[in-house]
Amino acid sequence: MDDEPAADEPAADKYTFRIVQGDQEFEVEPMQGDVPAEAFYDYRDPYQSRENPSWGRSFSSRGTTDYQQDSTSILLLYEGPKGVSLIVVHDKYHEDLDNATAGSSVSFQLTGLPDDGEWAMIDDDYGWRIDGEEKGDVAQLDADHRAGAAGNDGEPPEGVDARLSWAWKTGRTDGMAYRGLADEDLSLTIDPAFNEDSYHRVGDDRRPDEEPDDPEEGEEYNGTINDWQVISATDGGDDFKRIWFDSLKAEVRIETVPASEPVTASLSGPEQASVGQNVTFTANASTDDVDGYEWTVNGTPVESTDGSTLTHSFEEAGTAEVSVTVTTAAERSDTASRTVEIAESETDGTDATDDRTPGFGAGAALVALAAVLLLAARRVHT
């Protein structure tokens, strides 16, 4: 297996991947790995290990279990030694079926697949089970995308590059991997059909077999996918986050766009303050494309009335750290911090806005009180 990336693959720092569904629009970072996409997916079936058949009877992706969730479809981009792949996995694998949810069915119609890409994995191809009878998932591909694809079934779909349709049972997963997305002009559209809307549903007459599947088996195949998520790498690939699509019905577009410039944050403000004194800090960014500011004082989030500035008073003397995280619309972020030394208040606890008459201090008050008492005593003796 050739582990070298394609020679004409553009440098990763020239573009980034963006996913769009309706009003949702966000950049995603591919997960990173040192094995090809098919090994990352790690599909198991009995033919993969004849010496130990039980090893492969899960009919599931065993390499993506960290990302899988019950009744959920995920898609992620994976960058391995042979390029960038689109990985799709439906549902969650369970060894103990008592903890599993029922399987379901999903169909994707794909348009805009790169012509020089390849199918690293289409899960499943069950043709080996019964000679002459196709029971596998449906993969209908146009001529440019048929080569090397497992599970190829039926005539090519009209108007799209591929139609993939999956059905799986309780405790298993289904999915695919398509390699070759490293294209500066990528614009790949997924037209989804989940659950009852899928191209075939176990137990109905739409499944392209001579006879429909046994409807009595439908319960373990005809659960529901309730969520559709994108997995995006974070922390340089050491972790990941989940982004939920708003809809199970609306089309999704995956595209490459010129890489956005990284943002650099800076923070200005006083280095010293007193307890109870209002002081102001101002955040600055190296770009105007700022989507939000998040402020913290000693790690605790604080609200700002004006996103780029924070007016704050400190309750205790000591050292405080003020931080701001600036995030752009392209979800790039940077954090700047400033250390502030907090001194005890110089006031003696009296109100700094005391409106007493100037010069009328404590001594003058005592003299006035004595004069009043003397006058009162004279009146008594009169």
Image (spheres, rainbow, N blue to C red):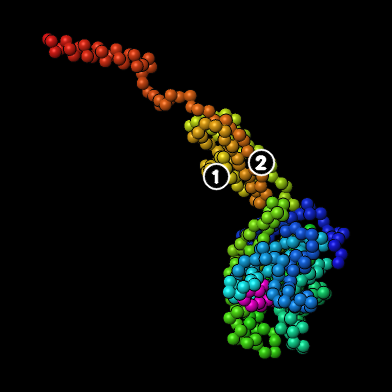
Q: Which residue is mark 2?
A: 265
Q: Which residues are magenta?
A: 165-174
Q: Residue 301 got which mark?
A: 1
Which residue occupies 57% across, 33% down?
319
| Quadrant housing the N terminus | bottom right
Residue 278 in the image: above or below residue 354: below
Which residue occupies 83% across, 67% down?
116
Q: CA distance from mark 2 to mark 1?
A: 17 Å
Q: Viewer-proximal residue, 327 or 71?
A: 71
Q: Position of residue 315 (x, y in %)?
A: 49, 34
What amino acid is found at the position of numbered circle 2 in the picture?
A: Ala
Q: Position of residue 289 (x, y in %)?
A: 66, 47
* Residue 369 shows in the view: yes
| Quadrant housing the C terminus | top left
Q: Position of residue 293 (x, y in %)?
A: 59, 45
Q: Secondary structure at mark 1?
A: strand
Left or right side of 136 for 201: left
